[in-house]
Image (tube, grey):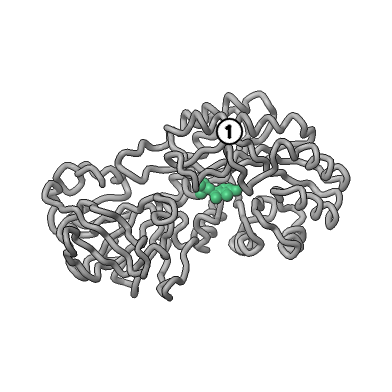
Amino acid sequence: VSLAPAAGPDAGFWWARDDLGFKDGRLHLAGHDLATLAATVEGPLHVYSEARIAANLGRLHAALAEIGAPARVYYAMKANRFEPVLRALARRGLSGVDVCSPAEMDRALACGFAAGDVSFTGTGVSNRDLGRLLAQPDLTINCDTIGMIRRIGERSPGRAIGIRVNPELGVSYGGAERLTYAGDAATKFGIYREQWPDALAMARVHDLTITSLHFHVGCGYLTRELEAWDAAVGAGLAFVDDLPDVRTVNVGGGLGLPHRSTDAPLDLSRWAEMLRRRFATRGLTVAVEPGDYIVKDAGVLLLQVTDVERKRDVTFVSVDGGFNLAPEPAYYDLPCEPVACQPRSFDTAAWRPMTVAGNINEALDIWAHAHPMPELREGDRIAFLNAGGYGASMSSNHCMRGEFTEMLLPG
Ligand SMILES: Cc1ncc(COP(=O)(O)O)c(C=O)c1O
């Protein structure tokens, strides 16, 4: 349950910022009235702000400029692969792209990224996948298993490769297990320390040069998780000593953002300071591959109220889209804050707890429980915040309710 903000159209909402808030009583993103935008299309609408994407990327670059080592950003396009978003990023030229499938690679190339600015970090890579990946000589391929090293060596001896390692330390939003990619329990991601000699030997057999080291240890970390993240980076870096040809260390993505009023944003200065301490004297390029940090808070999902009905002691607000359009709240408990686009009253003390429910026949299809909302009626619009990452890209056609429109607000 969100803390009730102070009364007044622009006062006190924890999520409000320069480009997101109420103007004349109507919710705006990047200067656009969201209820009006929603009315221009049929059904659910994912809207993204290019200006916010650029601001997020700019903030990250400013932090990376402080680390005393060359740095590169590879946007993890699994978070949002909407072509206008990719084209806008390619035009700006401030990032490469990390892809996790050949189809993502093809889309990145088609949207204007050069193969030399694309890295592949995937799991369960088939020989068919490899055929397509290896056809791009400039693509960086991060190997996730010894078998993948062998199969690349058999097909493309002498190639430069990256290796993804598992530092056995992980982080995530609030310590959520499902968002943690490395830790005590074995995960499918990366090559473990005890496999390391075999991995190096396999690369040697095929004359593969290991030019990059990669680790990604979890998603959604915030300031409260930074110490643990720093320890994971230290553990990952321990692998570098065995790699005479390594040029780049990719510390993965996972940079988080607030989802609840109680979340403090990620302190990027502290983050950069940790990287500076780890990298300043090593002569290596630092790569990062965030997805969410670039796009998540740049996007909202706009849905329309279909019913408002009290059932027992709960007021249910039903909307015309479900968790299949933005699965992370249901899968990972990463909420998309529902915000009425035109509240009838800003007397937030009078707002009532409402349970906002989607239109999918699954009990877990609840957007928010007992969330303080103003009076709502059929036809009203609700914006679900933080839907710009892993919303559309993870969506499914469950119940054949998978249709939606996407829109990039240029800026
Ligand atoms: C290898 C890899 N890199 C980067 C990312 C991006 O993570 P995030 O969007 O949390 O920054 C992921 C997400 O799953 C990943 O698996």
Task: Name the spot of residue 343 as percent of width and height, x first.
Answer: 18, 57
Task: Name the spot of residue 345 as percent of width and height, x first.
Answer: 12, 55
Indicate if the residue with disc 1 has its beta carbon within 8 Å of ligand 1: no
Instruction: Give the residue type at disc 1.
Output: Ala
Q: Residue at x 72, y 49 (%)?
A: 145
Residue toward you, 23 or 150: 150
Residue 268 showing in the rendered view: yes
Task: Name the spot of residue 371 as percent of width and height, x first.
Answer: 24, 52
Q: Is residue 256 left or right of residue 317?
A: right
Q: Is residue 66 left or right of residue 118?
A: left
Q: Is residue 153 left or right of residue 233?
A: right
- Count the marks: 1
Q: Is residue 27 above or below residue 220?
A: below
Specify the quadrant of the image occupied by residue 38: bottom left
Under circle 1, the secondary element is helix
Q: Is residue 191 left or right of residue 85?
A: right
Residue toward you, 373 or 36: 373
Task: Name the spot of residue 217 as percent of width and height, x first.
Answer: 57, 41
In which quadrant of the rendered image does the C terminus lie? bottom left
Q: Residue at x 44, y 42 (%)?
A: 173
Q: Residue at x 23, y 53 (%)?
A: 370
**Residue position marked by numbered label 1 in the rendering:** 232
Q: Residue at x 59, y 41 (%)?
A: 185
Residue 411 showing in the rendered view: no
Residue toward you, 315 or 283: 315
Residue density around tag 1, few if under 14, some if 14–19, many if 20 or more, within 10 Å = many
Specify the quadrant of the image occupied by residue 248: top right
